[in-house]
Image: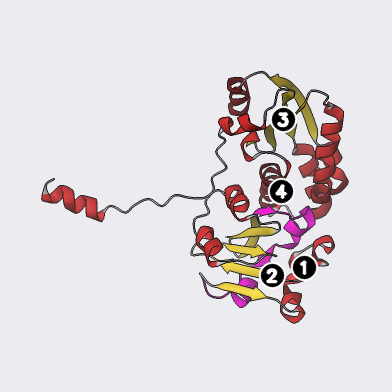
């Protein structure tokens, strides 16, 4: 290798692998947390798990507020007594704030803030630095171990547009400026629930602005109506009764791994 080639190699920075938020949640088994990102002079929830819609809206907060709470980047802040926690409770809905005993906060070098009800360790903090805008990459072969002789793979297209729009209109009324941020945050919470709670991480993909595709592996005595009702019930704490406006279309069964992959990638 010539000197110029060697110098070029030495100057080239190694690309650091990013980390999808849903993969971060699964890796660390976090139950209630949100990643807030600064837009102009305010912070908004960008990604979350375990947050309801009212908390996502309540968490809209000023940069000045957070500069007082966590002024230093790459530092873990712990709030473990009620006097410390009280100023932060305004970020949560009534349903969540009553169960909060501790809060932990970390601001990364991109000025994103992770707010968690569970302890943030140094290992978790290191991973917060890696968070990017990517989504989980499905590996269909990981589903093979879930399929038994009496299993069937059900394909669903799910549209949250009307449910999300109705919830935002009811809650935010004339606040048009922040509507797009809240819409994105609500869909990310829904997506993360499918990835982290409801299904295998490799069973769900976003297919549009307010839509996703998912496959559910169940036994051959399944009920489409029961599955649909169960999914809506589990979104009700997020979107309240507007969850009933979710459109769940059954797209048939997948008879092979290739067919499952084709459905999720279409």
Q: Which region of the structure is painted magenta?
A: 47-73
Determine whether label 2 and label 1 are within 8 Å by CB: yes
Nearer the observer, disc 3 or disc 1?
3
Distance between mark 4 and mark 2 Cα atoms = 22 Å
The first of marks 3 and 1 along the sequence is 1
Distance between mark 3 and mark 1 Cα atoms = 35 Å
Q: Is residue 63 left or right of residue 16?
A: right
Nearer the observer, disc 4 or disc 3?
3
Query: Element at badge 3?
Result: strand
Query: Element at badge 4?
Result: helix
- Identify the residue shown where x is 66% and y is 58%: 34
Which residue is identified by label 2? 103
The first of marks 2 and 3 along the sequence is 2
Distance between mark 2 and mark 3 Cα atoms = 36 Å
| Above-or-below relation of 153 to 62 | above
Point out residue 78 in the picture as x, y percentages from the top left corner.
Answer: 64, 74
The one nearer the camera, 222 or 107, is 222
Which label is found at residue 181?
none
Is 59 within the magenta? yes
Nearer the observer, disc 2 or disc 3?
3
The N terminus sits in image quarter = top left
Which residue is identified by label 1? 100
Which residue is identified by label 3? 217
Residue 83 visible in image = yes
The first of marks 4 and 3 along the sequence is 4
Which label is found at residue 186?
4
Point out residue 227 in the picture as x, y percentages from the top left corner.
Answer: 82, 33
Distance between mark 1 and mark 4 Cα atoms = 21 Å
Determine whether label 1 and label 4 are within 8 Å by CB: no
Is 54 within the magenta? yes
Q: In which quarter of the view is residue 101 placed?
A: bottom right
- Identify the residue shown where x is 65% and y is 54%: 29
């Amino acid at each position: 290798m010539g000197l110029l080639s060697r110098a070029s190699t030495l100057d080239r920075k190694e690309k650091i692998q990013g980390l999808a938020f849903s993969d971060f949640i699964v890796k660390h088994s976090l139950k209630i947390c949100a990643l807030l990102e600064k837009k102009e002079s305010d912070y908004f929830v960008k990604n979350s798990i375990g947050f309801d819609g009212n908390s996502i809206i309540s968490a809209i907060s000023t940069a000045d507020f957070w500069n007082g709470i966590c002024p230093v980047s790459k530092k873990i802040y712990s709030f473990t007594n009620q006097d410390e926690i009280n100023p932060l409770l305004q970020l949560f809905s009534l349903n969540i704030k009553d169960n909060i005993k501790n809060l932990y906060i970390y601001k990364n070098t991109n000025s994103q803030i992770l707010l968690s009800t569970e302890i943030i360790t140094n290992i978790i903090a290191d991973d917060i630095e890696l968070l990017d805008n990517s989504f989980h990459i499905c590996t269909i072969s990981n589903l093979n171990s879930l399929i038994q002789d009496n299993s069937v793979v059900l394909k669903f297209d799910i549209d949250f547009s009307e449910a999300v729009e109705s919830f935002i209109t009811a809650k935010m009324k004339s606040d048009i400026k922040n509507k797009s941020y809240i819409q994105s945050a609500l869909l990310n919470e829904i997506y993360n629930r499918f990835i982290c709670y409801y299904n295998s991480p490799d069973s769900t993909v976003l297919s549009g602005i307010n839509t996703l595709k998912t496959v559910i592996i169940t036994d051959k005595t399944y009920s489409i109506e029961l599955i649909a009702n169960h999914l809506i019930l589990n979104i009700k704490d997020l979107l309240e009764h507007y969850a009933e406006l979710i459109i769940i279309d059954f797209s048939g069964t997948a008879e092979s791994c290739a067919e499952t992959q084709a459905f999720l990638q279409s």
